[in-house]
Image (spheres, rainbow, N blue to C red):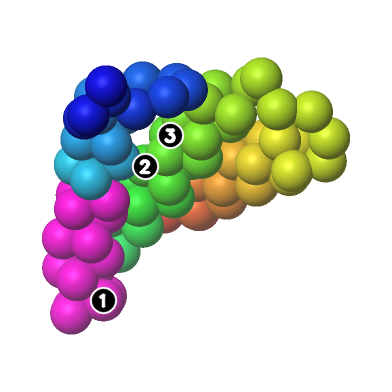
Amino acid sequence: MIGRSRGKVPNHKMDILYGVIALIIFIISVMALGNPDENMVLFPFIFFLAFVLRIFVFIERRMEEGKRKYIQLVIALALLILSVVSGISLWT
């Protein structure tokens, strides 16, 4: 029985996915904030990747009940709207 854990088996694929998306957001953010005039086109991508990250959190917590699960969905939708608005404002 030594070394066996009880309960749900951790899903390391989701942890790796979170880490990769967070690293991409960090790199793009540093580039965008380092020279905002030349790299302002990166801001919609930052918001969109943050939206993707929040959707994964929502999917992971789909079994939970209550307000915490839906707060993740509201944050994700707000990030999607922010991504679309910033993209439209840049490309028009």
Q: Residues within 10 Å of mark 2 (few under 14, many from 20)?
A: some
Alpha-carbon distance for marks 1 and 3?
A: 21 Å
Instruction: Say which residue appears at 50% left-offset and 53% top-offset.
Output: 86
The residue carrying pointer 1 sits among few (fewer than 14), some (14 to 19) or many (20 or more) residues within 10 Å by Cα, namely some
Judged left or right of residue 63, residue 4 is: left
Left or right position of 4 against 38: right
Q: Which stretch did the figure color magenta?
A: 22-36
Q: Is residue 83 above or below residue 58?
A: below
The residue positioned 19% from the left and 71% from the top of the image is 30
Q: Which mark is residue 49?
A: 2
Which numbered circle lies on residue 52? 3
**Placement of 65 over or under 42, stated as above or below:** above
Magenta stretch: helix, strand or loop mostly:
helix
Q: CA distance from mark 3 to mark 2?
A: 5 Å
Q: Earlier in the sequence, mark 1 or mark 3?
A: 1
Q: Secondary structure at mark 3?
A: helix
Q: Residue furthest bottom?
A: 34
* Residue 81 drawn at (x, y percent): 62, 42
In the current view of this chain or complex, which residue is farthest to the right? 66
Determine whether label 3 and label 2 are within 8 Å by CB.
Answer: yes
Do the numbered discs 1 and 3 sit on residues whose CB atoms are within 8 Å? no
Question: Residue at 27% of width from left, 51% of height from top?
Answer: 22
Front-most of 63 and 45?
Answer: 63
